[in-house]
């Protein structure tokens, strides 16, 4: 369940990030894509947190000592911080730029950073499976 939920989280974020980077769905407004996608993202994120907490509780001390786990949690926090900064700055002005023209550079950079961070979350999450025995 954790892997499935994380797949939905990352997949939905990829959809929005590709739109923000002007690489997909350019004919759709960012705000429309966001409004349709984010409920799935948050729902799946909640499931991922619950299932991840259950996995964590099975070997909490071992997970806390595991470097790949520590890095994964740090990367999730950085992805969250990136999202917060984006929503408090660039996205607040989306009504002014979300009109079919090019997406502002700040939004494209935030989306690229998001893609990179979530890709690394997957890498380090998978790595945990090889270090926690």
Image (cartoon, helix red, strand yellow):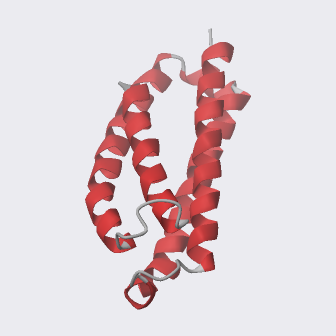
Near-viewer residue (129 or 118): 118
Near-viewer residue (114 or 25): 25
Q: Residue at x 34, y 69 (%)?
A: 28
- Quadrant of the rendering where the N terminus is positioned: top left
Q: Quadrant of residue 2?
A: top left
- Quadrant of the rendering where the C terminus is positioned: top right
- Side of 74 where 39 appears, left or right: left
Q: Residue furthest bottom?
A: 96
Picture layout, residue 1 above or below residue 130: below
Q: Residue 96, percent across and down?
A: 42, 91
Q: Residue 62, percent across and down?
A: 63, 19
Q: Residue at x 63, y 49 (%)?
A: 117
For the image, the number of numbered tags is 0
Q: Residue furthest front?
A: 27
Q: Residue at x 43, y 27 (%)?
A: 3
Q: Residue 24, percent across and down?
A: 46, 59
Q: Residue 89, percent across and down?
A: 52, 81
- Side of 114 where 8 appears, left or right: left
Q: Residue furthest top?
A: 133
- Side of 64 where 25 appears, left or right: left
Q: Residue at x 29, y 69 (%)?
A: 32
């Amino acid at each position: 369940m954790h892997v499935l939920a994380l797949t939905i989280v990352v997949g939905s974020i990829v959809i929005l990030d590709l739109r923000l980077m002007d690489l997909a769905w350019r004919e759709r407004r960012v705000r429309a894509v966001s409004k349709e996608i984010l409920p799935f993202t948050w729902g799946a994120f909640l499931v991922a947190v619950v299932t991840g907490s259950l996995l964590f509780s099975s070997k909490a001390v071992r997970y806390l000592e595991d470097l790949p786990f520590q890095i994964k949690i740090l990367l999730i926090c950085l992805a969250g911080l990136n999202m917060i900064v984006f929503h408090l700055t660039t996205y607040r002005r989306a009504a002014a730029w979300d009109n079919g023209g090019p997406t502002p550079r700040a939004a494209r950079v935030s989306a690229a950073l998001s893609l990179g961070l979530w890709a690394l979350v997957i890498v380090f999450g998978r790595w945990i499976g090889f270090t926690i025995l």
